[in-house]
Image: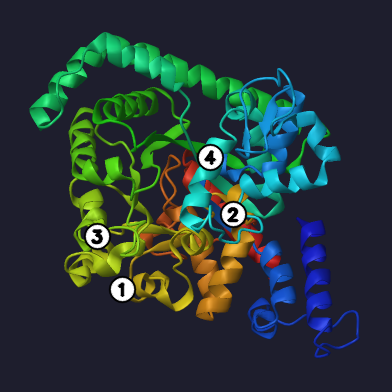
Amino acid sequence: MRFFCSAVFAFFVFLAGQTGRVSADPVAAPPSVATLFERVKTDPVRLELFLRAFPKGADLHNHLSGAVYAESFLKWAAGDGLCVSLKKRTILASHCPKPGEGQVPADGLPGNETGWNEMVNALSMRNFIPTEHDRSGHDHFFATFLRFMAVEPRHQGDMLAEAAERAARDNVQYLELQIAPIPFDALGEMMKAAALPPLRTEADFSRAYEVLKPALGRMAALSHVAIDEMEARARTIMKCGTAQASAGCGVTVRYQYSALRTFPAPFVWVQLVAAYESARQDTRLVGVNIVAPEDDPVALQDYDLHMQMFHTLNRLYPGTNLSLHAGEVTPSLVPLGDLDHHIRAAIDVAGAKRIGHGVDVLWEHDPASLLEEMARRSILVEINLTSNDEILGIRDGRHPFSLYRQAGVPVALSTDDEGVSRSDLTQEYMRAVLAYHLDYPTLVQLSRTGLEYGFMPGQSLWAGHHLGQAVPACSGMVPGGSAAPACERFLKDNMKARLQWQLEARFQAFG
């Protein structure tokens, strides 16, 4: 900790020294961190240096597949001997039987500058410019996942290591990664064997759950083994537990099991049952989510049906944490009738504790009462500024970030798909500062809020969501210093409080 403090001191002197406003005396006290922030926040270069070093509590909205850079997928495809279709701009799930016709071995791409750049651009939002055949940032963004899908199954551990190491470099303590650990073909076999009834009412869902009961144990086992293997591979890559361990080993990672909403209702139901059952039996799975384009025709048609599925499963699996993608649509994507209730239904019907995106709140029926309810019930919104810009074209003053804050709704910045977007949590903080002129106390609040609303187990360090007001056991103590026995026991017993205590210690060191 002493080395970290001296490093931060030197960093502050460097940043402030560039303004010409700090004494040359090497023992002179640096400016306060809040003062320094005000000096650099209008200078994007120094602001990024500041924010990259700034302690960030959590990234709560991060899809593991979307967190990986295109270059990594191409490297792994080369190692697997796979083929790349330059015509379709896709990694194929096979070798190249006879190269040509736009198909080349992935291991030959590094020597093909044009082909390499075309593939990196196709697998991410890098250099995206609308063309006659690729007009929409929305469509390009979501198409990337199909283009690297062939590589994912064999590289879950590599992906986890990349996400954890990037978080460590970005000074992020805690990741909640969205994953789907059970292969779809295995779930499809279970669905066929169960012969599900039609799914229209809660009684139908109850019958559908009964016929799936024989498969519950296999669901949980498949999920558990998949996460075991993923984590073991990631630990090996990062050399965790050795003297050469990478910083990523120090990032706390938990998972949300995410179902895809674009499939027919019976398969969405099977995914959700698998998600709830897996989360019940594996403490690493701290929540359940539903993902994929909200404006997809099937997702729109079945949106209310999906919310009823959650409602039924909440009764069968009480206490399951839900963070649901809701409100990631605008009038440019869907009719107004599909904008007026998605967030409200996710909260009131499905029982979501957190909302991912929440961009369409302005078009919800009676948005004022919805905002009031979200503030009263402390429903957090995961704000994804970069992807909302790239996918929806919503940015700066048109984004409801400030509206949520003014209404007292808790918000936390998150990355969504940092590999596809070519971004990270520092860039999300950058966007927020430059667009909304945030001050330093607000940055601290945003960082604290991420941990406060994370689904990791244990009680909070803060009493009643009052950030900065410690629970009685730890009240009046300085994080990073010695704690009274009662506080030490409390921190030992509660992961959330322990991570929060660590974040406060990092703030103390930061300035």
Q: In this view of the protein, can residue 434 be seen by the observer?
A: yes
Question: Of all residues shown, which one is farthest toward the front?
Answer: 101
Q: Nearer the viewer, mark 4 or mark 2?
A: 4
Q: Is mark 3 on a helix, strand or loop?
A: loop
Q: How crowded is mark 2: few (under 14 residues within 10 Å), some or many (20 or more)?
A: many
Disc 4 to disc 3: CB gap under 8 Å:
no
What residue is shown with label 3?
A: 335
Three-letter amino acid code of the residue under disc 4: Phe
Q: In which quarter of the image is residue 111?
A: top right
How far apart marks 1 and 2 lie (CA) works out to 29 Å
Distance Cα–Cα, label 4 vs label 3 = 26 Å
State which mark lies toward you, 1 or 4: 4
Query: Of discs 4 and 3, which sits in the foreground?
Result: 3
Frontmost residue, 319 versus 207: 207
Q: Are marks 3 and 2 in contact (CB under 8 Å)?
A: no
Residue 407: numbered disc: 1
**Labels 3 and 1 touching (C-beta < 8 A):** no
Q: How far apart are marks 4 and 2 (CA)?
A: 12 Å
Secondary structure of the residue carrying tag 4 is helix
Which residue, given by chain and number where applicable, does mark 2 sit on? Answer: 421
**How many discs appear?**
4
**Could you say where residue 263 lies in the image, as x and y percent from the top left?**
33, 32
CA gap between label 3 and label 2 equals: 27 Å
